Amino acid sequence: MANTKSAIKTTRRISRETKTNKIRKTRFRNALKKMKNIIEKKDKKQALDYLPELNSEIMKIAKTGIIKKRNASRNLSRLTKKINAI
């Protein structure tokens, strides 16, 4: 257990950040699942409408460091290729 005032504060801060990161990562995963479901339905119009929203969500996650920027770019690239293949 933390035994100094600053260590106690750091522990509180880390727990808050962890909760925030979990929420953001869950939103990211749900957005990916939603896009994958749209692609499975082969609904190109709906997929193209949802793409900017997904892009925004993924870049928010990458900006905060929850996932790496290359990972975000790779996910977007692969999904865009799948949409174009419909």
Image (cartoon, grey):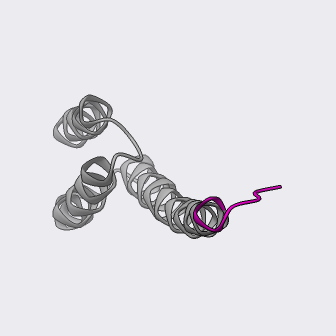
The residue at the point 29 percent across, 47 percent down is 62
Up/down of 27 relative to 75, above or below: below
The residue segment tinted magenta is: 1-7
Query: Is residue 63 shown above or below 84?
Result: below
With 38 as the anchor, is 30 left or right in this view? right
40 w.r.t. 3: above or below: above
Camera-nearest residue between 60 and 76? 60
Task: Residue 56: give x, y in percent of width and height.
Answer: 21, 62
Residue 41: quadrant of the picture: bottom left
Q: Is residue 3 magenta?
A: yes
Q: Which quadrant of the figure contains the C terminus?
A: top left
Picture residue at 76% right of the left edge, 59% below the top: 3
Q: Residue 36: horizontal and vertical position, in percent?
A: 43, 49
Observer-nearest of 50 and 26 = 26
Q: Residue furthest right?
A: 1
Membership of 12 in magenta stretch: no
Residue at 51% from the left image edge and 68% from the top image edge: 20
Write the residue at 27% across / 59% down: 60
* Residue 64, quarter of the rendered image: bottom left
Residue located farthest toward the front when viewing the structure as drawn: 4
Task: Name which quarter of the figure residue 2 lies in.
Answer: bottom right
Residue 63, percent across and down?
Answer: 24, 51
In front of the other: 34 or 5: 5
Q: Is residue 36 above or below residue 2?
A: above
